[in-house]
Amino acid sequence: MQDWLGRVAPDLDAIETLARATITDLPPAFVGPAGSVLLRIADFPPEEFLDDLNVEDPFELTGLYDGVPMTEKSVMDMMDRPDTIWLFRRPILDEWAERGNVTLGQLVAHVLIHELAHHFGWTDAEIAAIDRWWE
């Protein structure tokens, strides 16, 4: 039996390290566009995100793309903020513990790639059609 005394949960920096490793490991054609998106790691989603999405339980949201998808951008648009992918540590850790069948790195990569797909212009339905993660 492992001795869990003295161990701590992965912190924000650990989640960011896993996410950045995922970006580095993307196929070369995606590394540049993915690297142009700001990456933010927080313990929980800000209240305004929860309100905007009508999400009552902050543990239901592991990540969020906040920006304009590449397929909708125009050189004529004035951007008021950078495209940002948010990863939420506590919901990610909760899902990881509940699953018990994936590594933390796999889960962080999955959430990040899902949000990157939104940056590239994919809808949730399009992502779900090829990503059978939840089955």
Image (cartoon, helix red, strand yellow):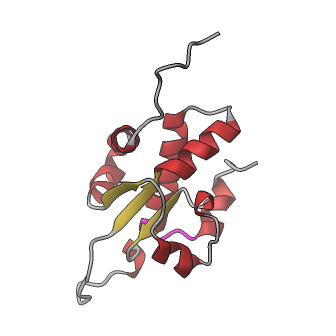
Q: Is residue 123 left or right of residue 18?
A: right
In the orientation shown, which residue stands out farthest toward the front? 5
Residue at 33% x, 43% y: name it.
20
Q: Is residue 114 left or right of residue 37?
A: right
Residue at 41% x, 74% y: name it.
69
Read off the magenta span: 119-123
Residue at 44% x, 35% y: name it.
10
Give the x, y percent position of residue 109: 48, 44
Answer above or below: position of 135 versus 21. below
Answer above or below: position of 3 versus 121. above
Say whether residue 25 is visible: yes
Residue at 37% x, 37% y: name it.
14
In front of the other: 122 or 55: 55
Does 61 appear in magenta?
no
Give the x, y percent position of residue 91: 56, 52
Say whether residue 120 is visible: no
The quarter in which the N terminus is drawn is top right
Does 121 appear in magenta?
yes
Give the x, y percent position of residue 95: 63, 45
In front of the other: 116 or 47: 47
Residue 77 found in image quarter: bottom left
